[in-house]
Amino acid sequence: MRNVVIHDPTLRDGQHAVKHQLGADALRRYAEAADTARIPVVEVGHGNGLGASSFQVGSAAVSDDEMLSTVRESLRHSRMGVFMLPGWGTCGDLRKAIDHGADVVRIGVHATESSLAERHLGFLREAGAEAHCVLMMSHMASPAELAEHAAQAVGFGAQGVGIMDSAGHFLSSDVTARISAMVDAVGTVPVIFHGHNNLGMAVANSVAAVDAGASIIDGCARGFGAGAGNTQLEVLVPVLERHGYATGIDLYALLDAADLAERELMPAPPVTASMSIVSGLAGVFSGFKHRVVELSALAGVDPRDVFFELGRRQSIAGQEDLIVDVVAELSARQTTR
Amino acid sequence: MTELAESRSGAVDPVRVAVIGTGAIGQDLVSKIHRSSVLDCRLVAGRNPDSAGLRRAANLGYPTTAGGIEAVLAAGSPFDVVFDATSAASHRKHWRLLEPLGTVVVDMTPSNIGQMVVPTVTGIQAGTGRNVNLISCGGQASVPVVHALATNFRVTYFEVVSTVASAVAGRATRMNLDEYVATTGHAVTTFSGVSDVKAILNISPAVPPATFRTAVHARIDGADAAVVRAVLDPVAEQMRTFAPGYEITGCTVIGDRVTVALQVTANSDVLPVYAGNLDIINSAAIMVAEQHAAALHRTRREAAR
């Protein structure tokens, strides 16, 4: 039976669904439940990672320091993970996270920009943390490009390298082609897959990723996450087990953690709402959803048009300021019509 | 006549300048120096003898070397102005070596050593033996807006988000993201008096490439979009006197959040039009050097009297 290592970014990617407003009590209670379930890595932070609390993507309710110390205290078995985008957070933020006891640190970069992670991966290796590199918005790159950037990240010191389906755009065949190419390119270095559920494909895509050789898979309790949500963790784990992959996670405790998450973290579990389907089809970062809906309503434009225009402009995660432009432009076009 | 107009009118003796670094910034600097009537490029120094940047400089007729900073130091009498278009780490070393020579060093890296200059805000205080810090592309683009907002409104928070096309984000930029964040944030605080600030840089791989843009977010109580816009229009006009591609493209107020969007296109023989990030910092650097040329000219004229 092959082992698959599950990473749980419920307390990081899930933040997108509640505009980064998770409080310390909620963080503590879920981290304890995840720890009881023996989930190997529990990731925490602002949705866009360390140092990302901002007007551009949303201000967090709780500081990075408090999030990290709260979750660290709650974990006895699980390792603590953090995430950071170069250009948003810095080595200073990484240092702080490691001092708080972060074990696994993921550097996120756009799919074709692995060179942005060079310095931070090097820093992490020197600091002694496990260093991963994840390529975001990976539907915007070909399998060959992803393989090239994965190999480059490994050259910079990444001990795990993978892709995020940040827009929830992939079908399973897309995932198979990409993960296979990456596994071929990086040999024994673990390959990571992080799915989103905009088109209802997250669990199936995660299975396809494992079948193609990925060995680290992300999932969130109840699928808590940006847009239509992430891969639903308590579905993913038993499905992987039925496929013959071992996760080491306790099913009953996992289900309890998911129930707790539904009660304490989210106003309602994520659904594949119309806007999330459009975001997935348009290939737009799932985290844009709230802002697109809000700004479109204020300007009286159709948010679906906004998503497709943002996709046409190849906007990437972090470019939330483009939403303002696109909404203003579509609104002006309407007025002159 | 202003010093700048005087220097550009050609009534000033050319000053000897050198450029270190042959990436996109260095190449565009050489081409902008080539256009200037008062800057005389006497050396272009790189590290790789086969680099396209050195070839281009040689084709324009300028002396080139792959000997880096050592070649600049070995050039006999010191240059009046040295443009350092390398990396923040290299610049720290270069400055230690150049400082004793009394050369004006124009620092294109985000090393944050010298005196920060944003031409329309600080003016250009030329002098000798000075390290002039051009901050960052995001700093050059945003500080004029930040300064105008802080002067006219009560601002409690500033955030500056820039997007640069992947094709014109060179290796030094990619390795210096931390310095970019720190230096840009420091400049925003220095020129606004607002201590709560954040700087962010996105690198976009979009095809066709995205034009360099910056969003300035500010927290201002009771701001009105039209009033904000009226404050900023003259700022943009002033910027266009030396960076013609500077344009404010949007101004949105939602509650206490003001977002000003601006973009800069390049006016360059070397750079693609979307590379406003490189153009704006280079345009400012050339302005600093021309100003210094005018000051030197005055000093020399007085000494000769």
Image (cartoon, coloured by chain):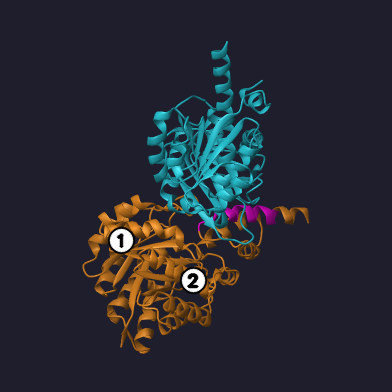
Chain colours: A orange, B cyan
| Mark 1 vs 2: CB contact within 8 A | no
Hey, which residue is sitting farthest top in the picture?
Answer: B305
Density class for disc 1 (Cα within 10 Å; few <14, some 14-19, many ≥20) is some
Numbered disc 2: what chain? Answer: A
Residue B208 visible in rendering: yes
Chain identifier of the residue bearing label 1 in the image: A
Residue at the image position 56 percent from the left and 71 percent from the top: A280
In the image, is residue A319 above or below residue B267? below
Say which quadrant the C terminus of chain B sits in: top right
> x, y percentage for residue B111?
42, 41
Vertical relation: B46 (above or below) A121: above
Residue on which disc 1 sits: A125
Of B117 and A50, which appears nearest the observer? Answer: B117
| Total labels drawn | 2
Q: Which residue is mark 2?
A: A146
Residue A161 magenta-drawn? no
**B208 up-or-down from A151: above or below:** above
Predominant SS of the magenta segment = helix
Rendering coords of residue A80 (x, y %): 29, 64
Task: State the separation of the CA atoms marked 1 and 2.
Answer: 22 Å
Q: Position of residue A195 (x, y in %)?
A: 45, 73
Magenta stretch bounds: A318-331
Pick out the residue farthest to the right: A337
Q: Amino acid at mark 1?
A: Arg
Q: Quadrant of the N terminus of chain B?
A: top right
**Helix, strand or loop at mark 1:** helix
